[in-house]
Image (tube, helix red, strand yellow):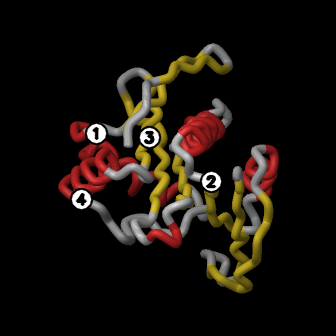
């Protein structure tokens, strides 16, 4: 599903958040690999579960058509610097909710990009009668957990020893949800 473009100014830097379009696919494929290599906060190692240009074109096309999917990009100086997706489910028993995920290039952390992608996704969900947004976050990403709590997400559970990071240690995944109904 689509929504309107929004402009943001933070710390003297301007960027827009808009729905992903087909021509974004190649750049999305490249920056996803880069982002995966910049942080251990996400599920993938650099290059894992690779999505090529055609794969992103298919995602964008499907997300544009589906009522309960939303694919947003954050663009600064004609360059995609982050993106988020809300992915719904076509099964009636789950049609009221979406799963949220977000990625931002490390050089652009601290400009509110992730926060604004989240805000726009929440606004879209609320205005489209999607009553629940779920997400998963690694326990070490305290900044993200606190941000999600600020926007009404609650901890719904913990997946113990869910991930192994580069230090060889196990870490928990926190399952969070925001219900607006």
> Can you name the residue that lies furthest to the left here?
54
Q: Which residue is mark 4?
A: 55
Indicate whether 62 appears above or below 121: below
Q: Are marks 3 and 1 in contact (CB under 8 Å)?
A: no
Where is residue 144? Give x, y as percent.
72, 52
Residue 119 appearing in the image: yes
Q: Are marks 4 and 2 in contact (CB under 8 Å)?
A: no
Q: Are marks 4 and 1 in contact (CB under 8 Å)?
A: no
Q: Earlier in the sequence, mark 3 or mark 1?
A: 1
Q: Find the distance from the CA under tag 3 to the CA under tag 2.
A: 19 Å
Q: Place residue 133 in its image quadrant.
A: bottom right
Q: Earlier in the sequence, mark 3 or mark 2?
A: 3
Q: Find the distance from the CA under tag 3 to the CA under tag 1.
A: 11 Å
Q: Which residue is mark 3?
A: 72
Q: Find the distance from the CA under tag 2 to the CA under tag 1.
A: 29 Å
Horizontal side of 19 relative to 178 (left or right) equals left
Q: Earlier in the sequence, mark 4 or mark 2?
A: 4
Residue ID at (79%, 66%):
155
Q: Place residue 33 in its image quadrant.
A: bottom left
Tell me the quadrant of the picture where the N terminus can be found.
top left
Q: Earlier in the sequence, mark 3 or mark 4?
A: 4
């Amino acid at each position: 599903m689509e929504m309107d473009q929004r402009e943001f100014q933070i710390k003297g830097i301007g960027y827009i958040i808009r729905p992903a379009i087909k021509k974004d696919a190649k750049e999305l494929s490249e920056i996803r690999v880069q982002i995966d290599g910049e942080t251990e906060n996400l599920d993938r190692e650099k290059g894992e579960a690779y999505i090529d240009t055609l794969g992103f074109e298919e995602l964008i096309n499907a997300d544009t058509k589906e009522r309960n999917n939303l694919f947003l990009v954050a663009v600064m100086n004609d360059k995609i610097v982050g993106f988020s997706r809300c992915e719904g489910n076509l099964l009636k028993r789950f049609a009221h909710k979406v799963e949220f995920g977000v990625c931002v290039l490390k050089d652009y952390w601290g400009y509110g990009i992730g926060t604004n992608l989240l805000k726009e996704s929440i606004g879209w969900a609320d205005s489209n009668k999607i009553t629940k947004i779920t997400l998963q976050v690694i326990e070490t990403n305290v900044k993200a957990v606190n941000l999600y709590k600020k926007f009404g997400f609650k901890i719904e559970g913990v997946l113990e020893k869910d991930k192994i990071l580069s230090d060889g240690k196990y870490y928990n995944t926190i399952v969070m949800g925001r219900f607006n109904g």
